[in-house]
Image (cartoon, rainbow, N blue to C red):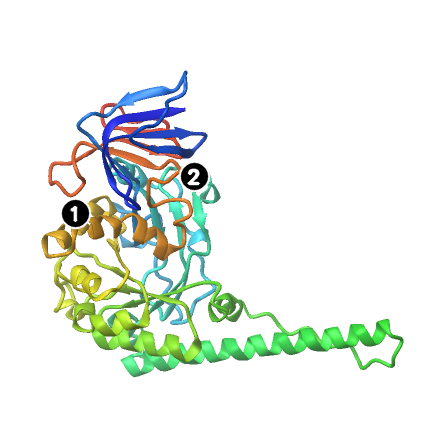
Amino acid sequence: MRALVNGTVVTVSGETLITGTVLMDRGKLVAVGTDVAIPDGAEVIDVTGKVVTPGLIDPHCHVGLMPDGVGSSYSDVNETVDPITPQLRALDALDPQAPVFKDLLAAGVTTVLTGPGSANLIGGTWICIKTVNKPTVEQMVLLEPAGMKMALGENPKRVYGARNKAPSTRMGNAAVLRSALVDTQNYMARWDRYEQDLADYQRAVEEGKEAPKAPQLPARDLKLEALVPVLRREVKARIHAHQANDILTAIRIAEEFGLDITLEHVTEGHKIAEIIAATGIPVTVGPVFTGRYKYELRAKHPKNPGVLHAAGVKVAIQTDAAWGVQYLSINAALAAREGMPVDAAFRAITLSAAEIIGVDDRVGSLDTGKDADVVVFSAHPFEYHAVAEMVFVDGELIYSREGGDADA
């Protein structure tokens, strides 16, 4: 059992405690408050003058799939052989020993949603993990599958248009995506019909009636099988869209097929903030801390998250990075500088991010019963000089600025 005492505790879900205590035991938060009884034998760590927060969360990145420092030939983030590849899984490519995870821990980033890139209209499933190196990916997983990557706009146009393959226009993007979803509906209908015919056949046999020939098992299709949970709203579609027209196409297709979606990047979201708000669709905005390195980012501005928040949209902030996730707090700080309330901007890289991913029962705030993923910062994370001094994951001290990796 460990107790962090006398720090400024940013719970995120509730009030900030000026002189608070965080009590951790067996990987969980067992008490958070200003009047916490500390059991005998607990390890007490005085964090006077420090800021205690939940671990930071990046809701959209590519770490573990796109290694840094070795060149693009080692990347596993885009499988550019077919614009429709829902059967791909980040789980099968992620490197649990990637050195970048230590960089993330040193910055206080303890959870990420990582997955395929945006070369394909449908790229495969995401995975939500904690950032502590483990022998296997399964030991890092918080949620898998954690969404189906879909993409609209310039990237699939560029990848397939350059090879004289469809789609090469926004019209083609939308048409091919719709076709894949219709194919999945037809696939589901075939299986539903088979299951009904099988039930009828078994009932006839049990009742001693003359039964027709047993129905034939439909052929499995891994592509369409992977999309079935998306059509059933069991898995979110996470749709990459920068331009306003692509955002509106994503909304249109989601409404046509009854999809549960998040909007990813949403660079021109400030142009149609009220429309997005009316749908109730959450967004992960970013990266904020980059330049306008392609045409569809020409309207990019750090004010975007704040404008969306003010309109009533649930906003998380992402880095979209393979290397650079450790600068997540800078992305959020820039949003705060450009008008997003500080509390909302910090929530965008903690609790709102966890809610949009679907892991807020485990992480994202300092609440009793949640995982003890806790960071002790030297100052508020939005201060330019702030550093993570101690990082706890599941209650274990994983990183200490004084000693580097503690238990990693």
Q: Nearer the viewer, residue 213 or 78?
A: 213
Q: Residue at x 35, y 51 (%)?
A: 354
Q: Quadrant of residue 29?
A: top left
Front residue of 204/191: it is 204
Which of the image's four quarters has the C terminus? top left
How would you rate the neighbour count of disc 2 (Cα within 10 Å): few for under 14, some for 14-19, many for 20 or more?
Answer: some
Q: 9 or 204, which is in the foreground? A: 9
Asked whether residue 146 appears in the rendered view, the answer is yes
Check whether the beta carbons of the residues at disc 2 and disc 1 lie within 8 A of each other.
Answer: no
Q: Amino acid at mark 1?
A: Ile
Q: Which mark is residue 369?
A: 2
Classify the position of the N terminus by image quarter.
top left
Q: Is residue 206 above or below residue 355?
A: below
Q: Nearer the viewer, residue 63 or 6?
A: 6
Residue ID for mark 1: 330
Residue most toward the top?
Answer: 41
* Type of the residue with mark 2: Gly
Residue at 23% in and 66% down? 266
